[in-house]
């Protein structure tokens, strides 16, 4: 049985939400030359004698290796696994895909860019174009991206997941801007009541001078209180 780990890597950009895709280049594997989700096989045997990688001791080891080799960064957030499989998705036989949606912040994005991979092999694409049913991809990767997007979008207003698109330190204005990318309107009062007062984010006891601060005033720097997603009791929205 073929077992793969696929990383649906997403970022926030001026164009909206974008997904990172890689072009398949191994002529010995199916769909060579097509765009695909960055991913790879789980190694159940040791290839070091042939100059390759050792056996993956668990799924976490496989995921980290694949992120290092294909994504060129370890995403700021990786979702719980989304598992699917059938005998038709890969022409080589029965295949199981363990996919994750992964959120990249600016530091992650810089690491991807600094990896030096040419854009005709690894590039960002507008999410709405990729899931429009007019974008051709390898295997069932369009369906995987749609499924990951559905899961992420359902979590946006009920968890703190959007905050993992941000750098480790951020401003209230960054939060408002990030939610706006998902069409969710939040204001400073909402951020204070639902995120600051509840302890989801905490002050770094530092202010910065930036145009993002209200009225150009110095803005307080915040960070997440935990590296785990927080679940809200009610929908996050401006009230």
Image (cartoon, helix red, strand yellow):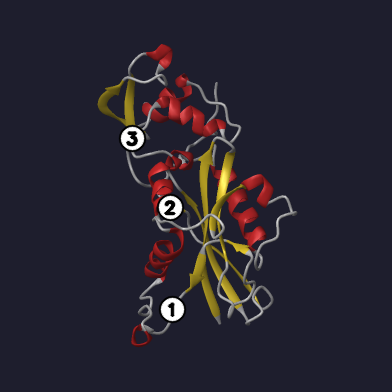
What whole-number distance in Å separates the C-alpha atoms at marks 1 and 2? 24 Å
Q: Residue visible at 50% across and 29% down?
A: 177
Badge 1: few (under 14), some or many (20 or more) residues near its Cα, within 10 Å?
some
- Residue extending farthest top: 215
Which structural element holds mark 2?
helix
In the shown orientation, is residue 75 left or right of residue 218?
A: right
**What label does residue 169 carry, if any?**
3
Q: Residue visible at 63% across and 62% down?
A: 141
Asked if 50 appears above or below 186 in the picture, the reply is below
Q: Which of marks 1 and 3 is nearer the N terminus?
A: 1
What whole-number distance in Å separates the C-alpha atoms at marks 3 and 2? 20 Å
**What label does residue 147 carry, if any?**
none
What whole-number distance in Å separates the C-alpha atoms at marks 1 and 3? 36 Å
The quadrant of the picture occupied by the N terminus is bottom right
Q: Name the residue tied to disc 2.
A: 112
Which structural element holds mark 3?
loop
Q: Name the residue tied to disc 1.
A: 43
* Residue in the foreground of this view, choosing between 71 and 121: 121
């Amino acid at each position: 049985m073929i077992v793969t780990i696929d990383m649906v890597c997403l970022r926030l950009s001026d164009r909206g939400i974008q997904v990172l895709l890689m072009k398949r280049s191994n002529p010995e594997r199916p769909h060579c030359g097509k765009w695909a989700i960055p991913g790879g096989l789980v190694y159940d045997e040791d290839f070091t004698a042939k100059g390759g990688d050792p056996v993956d001791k668990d799924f976490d080891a496989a995921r980290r290796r694949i992120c290092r080799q294909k994504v060129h960064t370890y995403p700021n957030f990786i979702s719980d696994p989304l598992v699917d499989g059938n005998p038709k998705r890969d022409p080589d036989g029965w295949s199981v895909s363990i996919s994750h949606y992964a959120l990249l912040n600016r530091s992650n994005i810089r690491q991807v860019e600094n990896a030096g991979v040419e854009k005709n092999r690894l590039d960002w694409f507008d999410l709405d174009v990729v899931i429009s049913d007019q974008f051709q991809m390898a295997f069932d990767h369009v369906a995987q991206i749609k499924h990951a997007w559905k899961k992420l979008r359902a979590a946006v207003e009920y968890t703190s997941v959007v905050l993992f698109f941000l750098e480790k330190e951020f401003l209230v204005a960054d939060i408002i801007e990030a939610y706006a990318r998902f069409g969710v309107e939040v204001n400073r009062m909402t951020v204070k009541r639902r995120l600051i007062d509840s302890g989801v984010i905490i002050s770094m006891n530092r202010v910065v001078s930036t145009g993002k601060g209200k009225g150009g005033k110095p803005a307080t720097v915040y960070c997440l209180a935990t590296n785990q997603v927080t679940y809200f009791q009610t929908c996050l929205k401006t009230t």
